[in-house]
Amino acid sequence: MTDVHGALTAQAELLDALLAPDPPPKRRGWPLVLLALVLVTVAVAVGIVVVSRDRGPKGPPHPAKWDARVQKYVEFVEQHREIRFQHPVYVDFLTDEEFAEKVTADEKDLTDEDRTEIEQATGLLRALGLVEGDVDLFEKSNKLNGTGIIGFYSYDDERLRIRGTEITPAVESTIIHELTHALQDQAFDLGKRKKELEEADDANSSAAADGFDALVEGDARRVETMWRDSLSDRERRALDKAQKKDVKNFEDGSKDVPEVLKAMVAAPYELGQAMLAVAVQQGGERAVDDLFRSPPRTEEQQLDPWTLIADHQGFLNVPEPELADGEKALAGDDGGSFGAVGWLMVLAERVPLEQALTAVDGWGGDSAISYERDGTTCLKANYRADTPEDLTQMQTALKAWAAKGPKGAAGVTKDAMTLAFTSCDPGKNAKRVSSGRSMEALTLALTRTYLSVTLVKSGATVAMARCSADRLVRAFSLAELNNPKIDPKRVAAVVAPCRRDS
């Protein structure tokens, strides 16, 4: 994922000058059901990771004091989150081999039910154009876990597990991240909150669970960034070098993993951190804790955090699609929201990114269910938009998406203010048409968020900043936005409508 967070601040002065209300002086110088099915191996791995223990009346056991090796990191997290730990937790430093055993699954441990779910998940991803051909989803997800996870905190036994027995700069950063999760758990009872969200049966519970995950991961990424910023130049260079090596190892080890799986894993971290950048800019550090008490409820609020922080926008209730005779819902799918992030990833595979983002920006609510018909995995979704214009934009995008796929595999119809979308697995031999741009689509949305925050910091109103950022990311590439020689006249022309509207 491109680091759009740090990169865009380089243009603050230029954009401030262009958007200032008066002439300035001259200056120098990315569905719960889908994800659950796709990452079924994670659930299998967790069954291996979490040691079953009698929690007893006081929960799992804790050490009397912190491991001396992590004491300074504990103090850093407490200081920068302005919350104190209630008690120490165990920290296990594991070899690569020991850690891999914790986060990957053995195929022989799969039940027949697991294998059926994996097969259905693969068909569902093909139905949505997110993967193509004959994909071994278990093997790819297992590889993603093995190469992409470098530490984790378990809410069940309240232990940290870190890949690596030597405390290197990269391990230090991981410790900071995972200690933040431990602190979140103690302050906000994350284990209980997550369980409540998982067991909720309302139509939007899956999106709420995703939003909470983004909040949790974004906060940990935020503290991790604070750690990096606190380092000396020499220490920062050492950390950057180590993390670049980790990224290269991940890229080398996951070259044949479908891009969408990587995007699904990255989304809560990246979108969560961007969401909190908006929250902190508007409400300071208190806003972070406020969000833990009243977290985002929709994926739209992750994709465009201003809809949460400034608009307090909710969602429309949409009736669940009805299954016809001969259609049977997949096991564990009781229906629920597909979500704006899911729509963006789907559309980005077959239509231009800007068109995909425009269509998804009008998301008002949806309801989807996956099912089987004559042995083929399919998905039905009902979709409503904020305005009639928004609905037309989504309908146009979905028609274009369906037209690029195998003939007859997907379709969309309109009834009043509701779109009915259906798509079925075209099979592993279907023509390949996907672009593999799901990660790029997330980056486009992230760039818009961070750019809008930069503009607000530079003095623009929220309305002007949001309008300008949206127009700029459609008119310029990320490289162009970070080029010190960007053409000011062209930028001014792009954002001029925002000045008029404000």
Image (spheres, rainbow, N blue to C red):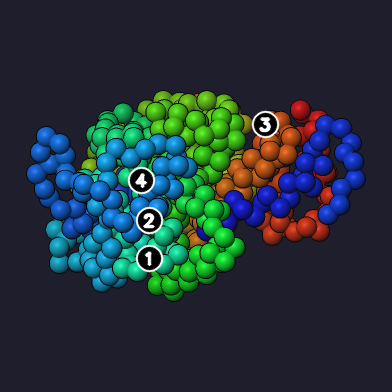
Distance of mark 1 from mark 3, alpha carbons? 43 Å
Q: Label 3: how many residues lie within 10 Å, few (<14), some (14-19) or many (20+)?
A: some
| Residue at image mark 3 | 462
Q: Label 2: how many residues lie within 10 Å, few (<14), some (14-19) or many (20+)?
A: many
Q: Which tag is nearer the camera, tag 4 or tag 2? A: 2
Q: Which tag is nearer the camera, tag 1 or tag 2? A: 1
Looking at the picture, does residue 457 appear above or below residue 129?
above
Place of residue 247 in the rendered image (x, y in percent of width and height, measured from the top left): 47, 67
Amino acid beneath label 3:
Val
Amino acid beneath label 2:
Ile
Q: Earlier in the sequence, mark 3 or mark 2?
A: 2
Mark 2 secondary-structure assignment: helix
Q: Quadrant of residue 163?
A: bottom left
Tag 1–tag 2 contact (CB < 8 Å) = yes
Tag 4–tag 2 contact (CB < 8 Å) = no
User: Is 426 left, or right, of 142 in this rendering?
Assistant: right
| Residue at image mark 2 | 175
Place of residue 67 in the rendered image (x, y in percent of width and height, measured from the top left): 28, 55
Distance of mark 1 from mark 2, alpha carbons? 9 Å
Residue at 90% in and 45% down: 26
Q: Nearer the viewer, residue 105 or 316?
A: 105
Residue at 54% in and 57% down: 231
Distance of mark 3 from mark 2, alpha carbons? 36 Å
Q: Earlier in the sequence, mark 1 or mark 2?
A: 1
